[in-house]
Amino acid sequence: MGVPAQNKGFGCLRVGIEMAIDDPKVMDQVTTELYPAIGRYFGSTPAQVEKAIRHAIDTVWDIGNAKMLAKYFNYSSKNPRRRPVNSEFIAVMATRIRMEMKRKKVGS
């Protein structure tokens, strides 16, 4: 998508998306469950996790793959590019990946 791997937020996003794929209910408690769990994984605080994820999403939105972003976040000239909030980004990515995994299973 365009997040440099050395960006701390990249790792936080990856772990958050993996957690949301494994348990979609975690998205109901982003600040009380998801961020603290990611923070424990990286030895960080929930506030630092939130900020790192926000920075990574800002980076994606500024320099990322525009075609992929348009596909995943359904924007067009009629529906301008609004940067999603952290939880929206994680939820959309987890849902898309989960759907893709199901399609591959069915197609096997």
Image: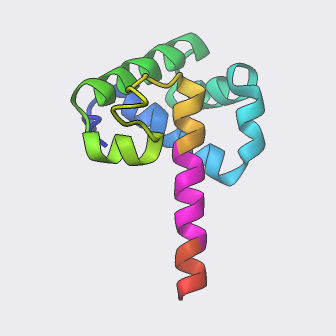
Residue span colored magenta: 93-102
Evaluate whether residue 41 shows in this view. Answer: no
Q: Is residue 94 magenta?
A: yes
Q: In the rendered structure, does residue 50 fall within the stretch colored magenta?
A: no
Residue lying furthest top in this view? 47
Q: Residue at x 40, y 48 (%)?
A: 71
Left or right of residue 66: residue 31 = right
**Front-most of residues 76 and 94:** 76
The answer to which image quadrant residue 60 occupies is top left
Q: Nearer the viewer, residue 44 or 21?
A: 21
Report the side of 67 relative to 74 (left or right): left
The image position of residue 81, as x and y in percent, is 38, 26
Task: Specify whether 61 is left or right of 92.
Answer: left
Residue 106 visible in the current orientation? yes
Question: Most extreme residue toward the bottom, as rendered?
Answer: 108
Residue 35 is drawn in which quadrant? top right
Percent coordinates x, y for residue 48 in the rendering? 50, 13
Quarter of the figure that contains the N terminus: top left
Q: Position of residue 3 (x, y in %)?
A: 29, 35
